[in-house]
Amino acid sequence: MGDGIFALTSSVKITDIAVVSTYARFRKEAFGVDTENERPTLHTNQQGEEVTALFINKSLNLNSQVAHFNPSAKTGYVLSGSSNDLLYLNYYLNTFYGKYKLSSGKIAGTKACPINLSSIKSINVLRNNKIEPYCIYMQMVIGSLDTFLDSKGCDNTLRSAIIASFINISDTIIQEMWLPRIFAKYEVSLTEEWIKLVDDVSSENDIDTQIHMLIKNIFNINSPILDSLNRMKTFGPQIISSALKEEIAGIKL
């Protein structure tokens, strides 16, 4: 699908890597639980430990996560599969692209959009074993930001700006995986810059220290990631236009 690290990218059906079911069916088959009030608590998390199921909300909007490792009153569907696949799907489905596909292309603004089994089962997932670990790490960081920023006493404006920037990076990585040649045309190389930065900070054992270093580097005036984000603001419409032209020409995005 591209050159360099992107040459390793392929697309698979979500049903090839996970079993998709309704939450009601999952509860009954896995635990013999029929009522929604009897919610099973699974040993699942996003810190790299073994996970057994990924829970998908009944509906979604752009401002909140749609996939989680613990069920809630919002849960409608479940993905079962290998730990590593589920960790990656947790990242993938929580990006804008994942939400767009879950909504069958109907997501708009903050309005809630229902999800159904057909939309989940129709999703094609990009796989790249060189990039996926850095995507899983990104999702872990996003899930840890609230607690970290609370500990630093960040005000709401700064908190929102930092979280929005990480979500923007997360969304852009998927876009670049889908359209590496178009991104190269506009000299946007965010994915490889993210990989370099994560490699630099991962020598620190403490996650808070890692997050602190990520924020410091990303918001540095000379940051290549910040440069790529700024270039996305400038060339985003052209990239989307090029993507639509390729889709019309028969290239499945």
Image (tube, grey):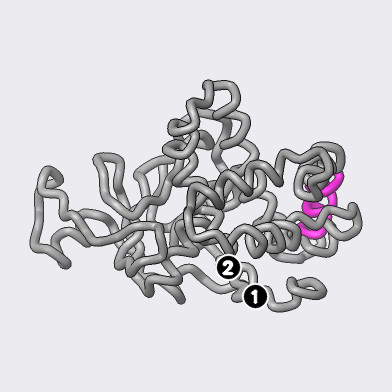
Image position, residue 231 (x, y; %): 84, 43
Q: Which residue sits at x=33%, y=66%? A: 51
Q: Which residue is mark 1?
A: 10
Q: How far apart, in angstroms, are the residues tagged by discs 2 and 1?
A: 12 Å
Q: Judge by depth and name the residue closer to the eye, 16 or 147.
A: 147
Image position, residue 180 (x, y; %): 79, 63
The amino acid on which the numbered mark 1 sits, given as a three-letter code, is: Ser
Circle number at residue 132: 2
240 in magenta: yes
Image position, residue 132 (x, y; %): 58, 68
Labels 2, 1: front one: 2
Q: Where is the N terminus found, in terms of image quarters?
A: bottom right
Count of labels in the image: 2
When the figure is inspected, residue 16 is found, relative to residue 136, above or below; the finding is below
Q: Is residue 23 visible?
A: yes
Q: Which residue sits at x=35%, y=66%? A: 49
Please state the extent of the stretch shown in magenta in the rendering.
Answer: 238-247
Q: Where is the C terminus found, in terms of image quarters?
A: bottom right
Image position, residue 42 (x, y; %): 22, 59
Disc 2, disc 1: CB below 8 Å? no
Q: Is residue 90 left or right of residue 124?
A: left
User: Element under label 2?
Assistant: helix
